Image (cartoon, helix red, strand yellow):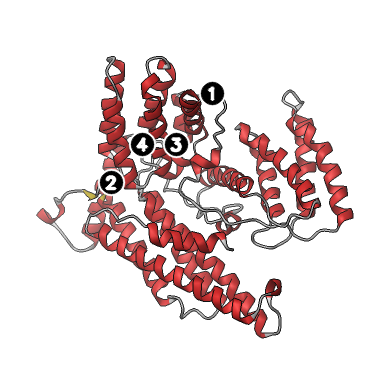
Amino acid sequence: MRMDANSIRAEIGFNPLGGALPDAEHALADARAAFRSGADPFSGIHRAKAALRTAGWLSAVLYAEALDACSRIAHIQSPLFDGALNDLAYAVGRRNLPALARSPILFERYRALRIAAEGDGVHVAYDEFSLAGRTVPHAHFAHVTAADLRAVRTRYETALLGALRGGADARIRESALIELEWCTSALSSNEPLDLWRLASACIRILRENGMRLPDDRRLLAGFNMLLAEQAGGATVAPPALVRSAVALLWRETSVQAVGTRGQPIEHEDLLRDYGLCVGTPPSHGDSPETLWEQFAAKAELDARVSRGMSGAALEVDRTRYIGPLVVAAGAYEDFLATADASMAALSERRAPRIVDSVSAAQASDAACRMATASAVLGLGQVGLLADALALGWRIRARQLADMHGATAGFLPGGATADTTDAIAEATDAALSTGTDALRAALYRIAAGIPPLPFDRSLAALNKLIEAA
């Protein structure tokens, strides 16, 4: 993959509503200056990593840790280290947390740093970088007859060769990918966490957008291995492969969302089944920093004028501070308004008062709006918690639908009424803990204080997600 300023600019657009991290930007500038003068960049990288960690930019933290691991051999690997340091500084300056985490170019830099520090034998998967800090639920195989599975497996293996052949004619590869998509569609069901439904979406998007990373080819081969595992009686897909598929779908779906703002996002519902709320910042072009300042000033001025203010009352600080994150006042007010509405919706539907799947789905939607707003502003840890909470409520909605079936005499998977009640109780407890943690975080944000770590609440939600 070609890595230059133009290509990374295309991947990570400037986010006019995103918060800046001046401490991290200054620290990375110091590290670059130190490295280019022959001094040790260690101090600057460590300061940048601390600011990124406080803001919850976990993919950037991983990248900074890889830079740190390479600092002892930085002058041996000079072009790699200098380019990687420059790319991170540029990416952080774009104030676009979601795009940074999904960037294939940054990931390739990250992989190169890991290999330089740890040796050629290290395996670095794209999902490790893009889904940092996230728990992805298990995916299952729908029931298929042995005869149908054998027939599909034969067709898949034949088509796979055409799809993976590096020098193949584009038409041959296109035909092969169409055949692979048919195979996975033939095995898929409408169940939310059906592996072949996820696989079919991935292959379709690879056919439309092309394969950009080595992980994409490995994923196609991995689906072939799953056919053998399912034939052997497996019912659950390997977690590593599920994460890889979800990361690919998130990467490419989000690229499409940026290019088609205001239109329905393809695969959005599927991504939400795996805990990813797709959202993009408003488009203001490939804006320089001056436009961010102008946008912040105009948004704040408009807001104050609408509240009847005039004269000296309009001359105010146009930025707000949330720990190391510096945000435009207008964007900050918009975020708090979204947060207030989302928390009101979550409080109305607070577990265990939810008794129907529709209300649980509405609570999931509210948490998802919170997750999207947090990611756009640059509040990484808040976004992760809200994403997990949105998925938890989505799982609760399915449980309630199953319980409704139980009242009609149908219990899922051989469950008993006692086990169903125990699962519901554990789910409600995790959702309550997550909601309380999110509310406490928002109180701190409103006061300009970064949220405390969400270790306990995230652990409870992740346990719920892993058991889904």
In the rendered image, is residue 417 in sight?
yes
The span from disc 3 to disc 4 (Cα, nearest Å) is: 10 Å
Tag of residue 325:
2
- For marks 2 and 3 on the same chain, the one whose residue lies earlier in the sequence: 3
The residue sitting at 24% across, 47% down in the picture is: 297
**What kind of element bears circle 2?**
strand
Labels 2 and 1: the sequence-earlier one: 1
Badge 2 local density, few (<14 within 10 Å), some, or many (20+)? many
**Upstream in the sequence, badge 2 or badge 4?**
4
Q: Nearer the viewer, residue 71 or 248?
A: 71
User: Which residue is pictured at 56% across the width and 45% down the height?
Assistant: 247
Label located before the other in sequence (1 or 3): 1
Circles 2, 4 touching at the beta carbon (< 8 Å): no
Q: What x and y, as percent, mark residue 191?
A: 68, 63
Cα gap from disc 2 to disc 1, whole angstroms: 31 Å
Distance between the alpha carbons at the discs numbered 2 and 3: 19 Å
Residue type, label 4: Val
Specify the quadrant of the image occupied by residue 13.
top left
Judged from the image, the secondary structure of the residue bearing numbered disc 1 is loop
Q: Are marks 1 and 3 in contact (CB under 8 Å)?
A: no
Q: Which residue is mark 4?
A: 92
Q: Nearer the viewer, mark 2 or mark 3?
A: 2
- First in sequence, mark 4 or 1: give its number: 1
Amino acid beneath label 3: Ile
Image disc number at residue 461: none
Q: Is residue 391 visible?
A: no
**Quadrant location of the N terminus in the rendered image:** top right
**C-alpha separation, residue under disc 2 versus residue under disc 4:** 11 Å
- Give the residue drawn at x 33%, y 55%: 453
Q: Amino acid at mark 2?
A: Leu
Q: Which residue is mark 3?
A: 12
